[in-house]
Image: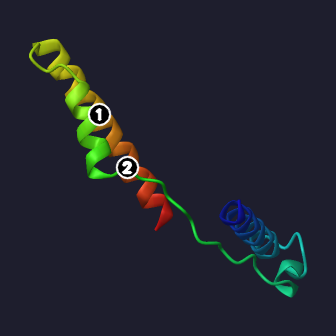
Amino acid sequence: MKNYAALIYGAFRQAMEYAVTLQYLRENISKKTKSIPKGKSLVGYCTKEEFEKVISVIYTHNFYEHMKMKVFMKILLYSLKGYLYLLY
């Protein structure tokens, strides 16, 4: 929640600065306040044992099940990659 507030406040500051550039405002009054510090993010993750347990339940002896598993894993890994990219 704190990170979200910091992002919104940063966007607000940029919008105010742009308004000064366009000469809608004489000065950026948001510079008189401190920015909101970002908090530490806690990211939950599964352990290797939990991941292996999920994989062991999926039946992969069928071609279609195998393809579903591949698609599921790609979506999972790509979404995690995007999420981790946003954190850093």
Q: CA distance from mark 1 to mark 2?
A: 10 Å
Give the x, y percent position of residue 65.
19, 16
- The residue closer to the viewer here, 19 or 58, is 58
* Residue 87 located left or right of residue 74: right
Q: Amino acid at mark 1?
A: Val
Circle 1 is placed at which residue position? Answer: 54
Q: Is residue 67 above or below residue 20?
A: above
Q: Is residue 6 above or below residue 30?
A: above
- The residue closer to the viewer here, 63 or 87, is 63
| Secondary structure at numbered mark 1 | helix
Circle 2 is placed at which residue position? Answer: 46
Q: Quadrant of residue 85?
A: bottom left
Check contact, mark 1 vs mark 2: CB within 8 A. Answer: yes
Q: Residue at coordinates 85% horizontally, 83% vertically from top-left?
A: 33
Q: Quadrant of residue 2?
A: bottom right
Give the x, y percent position of residue 41.
56, 65
| Secondary structure at numbered mark 2 | loop
Q: Residue at coordinates 48% horizontally, 59% vertically from top-left?
A: 86
Colour scheme of this structure image? rainbow
* Residue 70 located left or right of residue 86: left
- The residue closer to the viewer here, 37 or 23, is 37
Q: Residue at coordinates 87% horizontally, 86% vertically from top-left?
A: 32
In the rendered image, the quadrant that contains the N terminus is: bottom right
Mark carried by residue 85: none
Q: Characterize the local packing of mark 1: few (<14), some (14-19) or many (20 or more) Cα atoms within 10 angstroms.
A: few
